[in-house]
Amino acid sequence: MKEISELLFPDDVFYAEDHEWARLDGGVITVGINDYAQDQLGDIVYVELPRVGDTFEKGEEFGTVESVKAVSELYMPVGGEIVAVNTDLEDSPELINQSPYGDGWLIKVKPDDETEIEELMDKETYLAMLKEED
Amino acid sequence: MKERTGTTGLVFNEPLLWEMGRTGRSGMSPPPRDVEPAEVCEELQGKGPDFPDLSEPEVVRHYTRLSQWNFGVDSGMYPLGSCTMKYNPKTNERQAARKGFASAHPLLPDELSQGALRLMAELERCLAQITGMDAGTLQPAAGAQGELTGMLIIHRWFENRDDRRTKIIVPDTAHGTNPASAALCGFRALAARSGPHGILLPETIEELMDDETAGVMVTNPNTLGLFEENMEEISRIVHERGGLVYCDGANMNALMGLVDMASTGIDILHLNLHKTFSTPHGGGGPGSGPVMVRKELEPFLPVPRVVEDESGALRLSENHPLSIGKVHTFYGNFGVMVKALSYILSMGPNLKRASELAVLNANYIKELLKDTYHLPYDRTCMHECVFTDALQQSYGVTTLDISKRLMDYGFHPPTIYFPLVVKGALMIEPTETESKETIDTFIESMRSIAREAREEPDLLLNAPHYCKTERLDETGAARKPCLAG
């Protein structure tokens, strides 16, 4: 596992307490797990995602990621309807390890309330939370 | 360090049975046919099963060779936390193999099964005495099925009172199967965080427990190997709000004869005979997970139940209208019950001593290794202790590498990355049956591995080196599983 300083935390996404990230683009929010989460989990071997059309509230469980070490639940950083899921992950779950903010995205959500994303943490606040947890 | 227990030796590679043999080869000679051949009607005809064609020595060697790849509690120390891999005394096997027990047919009428029924009644009585509970069922085939049975009983209890409850509290130090067992009965699991000393605080329960919550599922001792000291207070809060207290007793090996579980306020408790009561554990079973209850819950126990009539004869009774029903075919895994009763009767009052030694052994390891490995909860533990890899991380070595290297020293690895509340957990449970010499060798091996982590981390990163198979590609196996025979 890497030191926190070796991990990538881009500025253009928001961070949730449960280590998901969210990025707003043209009214749709893309969600994934961040570099810290994928590093902690280790090699990811399976991802279970919702169906397009499912709706969830903020904080609700929308799927699971499974690594050699553990199974982890995924929680909605914002409430809304699933408009796309990353089907590439079915055959290549390693994309999450290789590119957590890019090809390893999990779902796209049409949010009930776009401004809900602003309740999430920015990079600095999230890093401060990680240091405290450590 | 003295000579390592692990060494190299010649073991054989062995193909699958279907890759061996030759068409037509057979291990047996059926007697010559002494009747006229008869036609088999067409609908019964089809392709036969795909049996391999092998001789008897091929089959014997195959399984003997596979057994040489194995590691079990009969070959070495197996400190797998929360699994209680204690030695299984051979007398238990001898009793279970007695013809009267081993050949008993489950469809025999009660009057011809008095011995078997007496054994079940006696085991139930012993388990009630050991735990302080009033009654129980021996039917569930394993711990998780015991949990499910317990949850079904709780569910039925509330249903019978017309009280609909939808939630149940499960602490973060409970066994991983607890929330799943609750969810199967329609309860939503509410996670309760353990306090700063690794045990549950009454105020946490105070906050979560309401009149829609069926109660709490506590593992005691918990998965950090710590005794839940606040159970009386927690039980009081739960009972006051109409709830029930379920205790996962998989870790009872720390408490036999030392704690009256009923006096901690619990209502239901499951036991694992294949852990605490020394019945064999490997190969996925068979296990046995009896569920013990307070008398208020007795009417809900699974049927059939063993009951005694006025004449002292025993019979299986289905006449319990509030029962949750059957949870296993016939009456559970009977052979396991014979072994458990054999253990209980041969130990007698020494069961208490077994628990004392299990706790002493775990604390001995904890004290002697806590300067070498990070100990997240530095307090007296029960039958197991939990370390982490925090002191080794700066060498690029993790819990996984430490446990793989331990195999080179001739020990089974401990439980790793569990409980989830501890990052990089190494959970060690030595049990009472290891001698001081073996435990000292284990401690010395763990210290030697910590030294290697500092000086030669590659030794750990590529471990194991002396096992028949070296480091497996676990990721590849999980991502692209090959399940064909």
Image (cartoon, coloured by chain):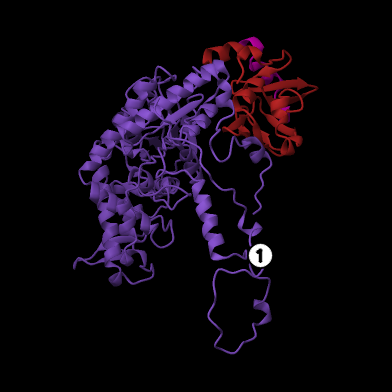
Chain colours: A red, B purple
Quadrant hosting residue B437? top left
Residue at x 37% of width, y 19% of height: B378
Please identify the residue farthest to the right as the structure is shown.
A26
Residue at x 64% of width, y 17% of height: A119
Answer with left or right where residue B378 lies relative to residue B121: right
Where residue B332 appears, as percent x and y from the top left, is 40, 57
Where residue B66 appears, as percent x and y from the top left, is 53, 50
Quadrant hosting residue A126? top right
Q: Residues within 10 Å of mark 1 (few under 14, many from 20)?
A: few
Q: Subunit of mark 1?
A: B
Quadrant hosting residue B154? top left
Q: Label 1's element?
A: loop
In magenta, the rendered stretch is A106-125
* Residue B28 drawn above or below residue B406: below
Please identify the residue farthest to the bottom as the structure is shown.
B36
Residue B182 vs residue B207, the one in the foreground? B182
B192 magenta-colored:
no
Residue at x 75% of width, y 37% of height: A87
A123 magenta-colored:
yes
Residue B225 shows in this picture: no
Mark 1 residue type: Arg
Which residue is identified by label 1? B22
Residue B79 vs residue A95, the one in the foreground? B79
Residue B331 vs residue A109, the one in the foreground? B331
